[in-house]
Amino acid sequence: MFKLALAAAAVTYVSAQSFVSDPLVDKIIPYTAIPYQVDQHTADRGPQSGYNICNSTTENQDSMCQTGFMNHIDDFCIFAPPNPNTTIGDSEGEEVAWCTKKGHGSRLIPEGALQGIQVVQSPGYIQIVGFIDQTKLNVADGDFGGELDSGGQDGRGNPIGGLVYSNAFPSNNGNNGSYQQSRHWTYFVGGNFFCAKACDDTQPNAEALCEHIYDRIGCAFNAPNTAQNGTFEYCKGDDMTPVGRYVTNGVTMTFTQPPEGVSVSVPYVATPAPSSQCTTFASAALYTDLASVGVSGSPAGSAATGTASAGSGSSGASSTKSGSSPAQTGSSNSAGTAMGLSLVSGFVGVIFSVFAFAA
Ligand SMILES: *[C@@H]1O[C@H](CO)[C@@H](O)[C@H](O)[C@H]1NC(C)=O
Ligand SMILES: *[C@@H]1O[C@H](CO)[C@@H](O)[C@H](O)[C@H]1NC(C)=O
Ligand SMILES: *[C@@H]1O[C@H](CO)[C@@H](O)[C@H](O)[C@H]1NC(C)=O
Ligand SMILES: *[C@@H]1O[C@H](CO)[C@@H](O)[C@H](O)[C@H]1NC(C)=O
């Protein structure tokens, strides 16, 4: 069933570019052996626009670093356009890493861009979801965005050659300096929101938990969450039901996204997996490396003035499962319309309904 779904969706992708014989998801690249550019192709979509070796000389607001991290609530990167006022759809192959912390050889996320963040660490993945001012990350105002992932229409990834590492997986044994590659990852960026998931390839379900074929449907479907604007929290969670799978009358079904031009009608509402042990933080205390707005190439280290970080315990324990946050309730109630929207042109997908309720 699942393989069928994959094959059916692949048909819509392959029409534009031929699928490479050495797809990005198959490239096992230890953190200590990252090449200058992981993608060597030049045909079709052209060469990789940036690079994967990122270091102190590439750490500035013009960086073309395409190696990202998903480590912790205070240490992650978002892939976003290199040039201002760009839609995700127009730049999907060329996105660069914007990170919360120095040390990754990337651009730094500007102050004020992060408005609410929820991190959920599950056995199979780390998921980071948040409310953003996307214009500070070069995403055009009003762009509903789309999906970036290690698959892509030709297997080269979006961005082409994008790599993602994490020190949050069990393999790192609590060592922040030990990074494991995630070969299955997805980001959705747009609508002043983003969701990112990096799956642990040492776990059995990485491909299904980070499935990338539902590019027209958005965060509520691909990364169900209870993120709230203005809240910064880190939680432990269970794995979600693999993306696209649902149970009806006791039978597990796999939803297949229809081809471009056919409106999407999702037959179920994806619910966030149970989470617990949530810790909330004062945002100013979390992010000490953010770039000053408008000062290109000279990030300010003094952005954070706050000192307290409030560890307020297990607030997410029951609210997650019941979906009682405003955002999740909202998206559930309106799923029929929000998820069925088809204002799609080409790659650009529908992000989702949370915004309407959070605003
Ligand atoms: C730093 O990164 C750049 C860009 O990838 C690369 O050209 C350069 O060789 C790197 N420097 C060192 C010392 O590794
Ligand atoms: C962004 O680009 C659009 C389309 O080119 C243009 O109409 C708009 O004025 C630009 N916005 C900014 C802030 O530069
Ligand atoms: C590891 O990183 C986390 C989050 O960035 C931080 O809270 C923790 O102090 C770090 N641990 C060590 C040993 O540096
Ligand atoms: C999130 O909160 C900020 C600050 O209050 C606000 O400017 C922004 O519009 C909110 N974002 C959404 C998507 O509602």
Image: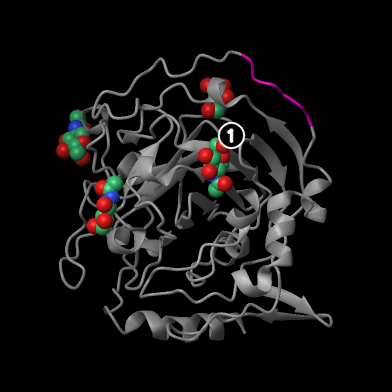
Magenta stretch: give its range: 308-313
Q: Which residue is mark 1?
A: 173
Left or right of 224 in this view: 46: left
* Position of residue 30 measured from the top left corner of the image (x, y, whole percent): 38, 46
* Residue drawn 80% across the image and 34% down it: 314
- Above or below: residue 124 compared with residue 154: above
| Quadrant assignment for ligand 1 | top left
On screen, 68 above or below 279? Answer: below
Image coordinates for residue 66, horizontal then vertical, percent: 30, 47
Does residue 309 lie above or below 204 as drawn?
A: above
Residue 168 is inside the magenta segment = no
Q: Is residue 113 left or right of residue 14?
A: right
Q: Position of residue 42 (x, y in %)?
A: 15, 66
Q: Nearer the viewer, residue 193 or 178?
A: 193
Residue lying at 19% horizontally and 60% vertically, measured from the top left: 40
Q: Is residue 162 left or right of residue 130?
A: left
